[in-house]
Image (cartoon, coloured by chain):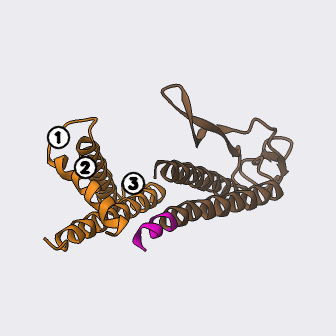
Amino acid sequence: MDEFFQGAAAAASGLKAQAHRLRLVSENIANADTPGYRRKVTDFEAVLRGGQPTGEVAAGPVRLDPREQERIWDPASPLADETGTYLGSNVEMVIEIADAREAQRSYEANLRLFDQARQMARGLLELLRR
Amino acid sequence: MDIRSTLAAAEYGASRPATAPSAGTAGGRLADTARDFAATLEQADSLGQAALTGRADAHSLVQALAQTQLAVEAAVTVRDRVVEAYQEILRMPV
């Protein structure tokens, strides 16, 4: 049973990490027009327990993308400086949507694996019942 | 005599000192298994309560519940087999 539990734990940690990634993507998309917004990115890291990798994944700290934000030309805006532009955000829709799609695929794969580990364990127990 | 009854008798004899809490023997292993099982159930219960009050995330809850479900199924199956073995022995004509 321990192998199945560890496999399920790894899949569950993957689910949590991908859900966190999807949340950051949705926050970025929601703030795509916020002036001065920097998109949030995060890296995944392997979970260590007592120095040994457990096979699980965890989302690392949330960082801000240091890329240049775009300058939006709108002299009528109250934020506009002397050139008539103000600082927008550095969120690019295409990148965010692609990231969201990847996160969804990874989430589905982890979900399927979690269910498969459960089914294999249950199939093994079925042998005892007969 | 059926081979299953012989094996069942041996298994029953091995599980008889299950009430003695000593590690290392077959009874000790059974007690350890029961303790792990109880700990799994307790953890799932506390996680379920935390999820109801909004403090735990859905993934931990699902993982703990799936683990509990599997542990309970395994325990029930083992219990059924041991009880069936015991009943087989009782059915032996004296």
Q: Amino acid at mark 3?
A: Ala
Q: Is residue B8 above or below residue A67?
A: below
* Element type at mark 3: loop
Nearer the observer, disc 3 or disc 2? 2
- Which chain does the numbered disc 3 sit on? B
Nearer the observer, disc 1 or disc 2? 2
Q: Is residue A128 magenta?
A: yes
Q: Is residue B74 above or below residue B87?
A: above
Q: Residue at x 30, y 66 (%)?
A: B5
Kindly indicate which chain is depicted in brown in the rendered structure.
Answer: A
Say which label, 3 or 2, has the lower sequence index: 2
**What crowding class fits label 3: few (fewer than 14 Cα within 10 Å), some (14-19), or many (20 or more)?**
some
Q: Is residue A95 magenta?
A: no
Provide the residue designation for mark 3: B56
Q: Amino acid at mark 1?
A: Pro
* Element type at mark 2: helix
Kindly indicate which chain is depicted in orange in the rendered structure.
Answer: B
Q: Which residues are magenta?
A: A123-130
Provide the residue designation for mark 1: B21
Provide the residue designation for mark 2: B14
Q: Amino acid at mark 2?
A: Ala
Left or right: B30 in relation to A16: left
- Main secondary structure of the magenta stretch: helix
Q: How many marks?
A: 3
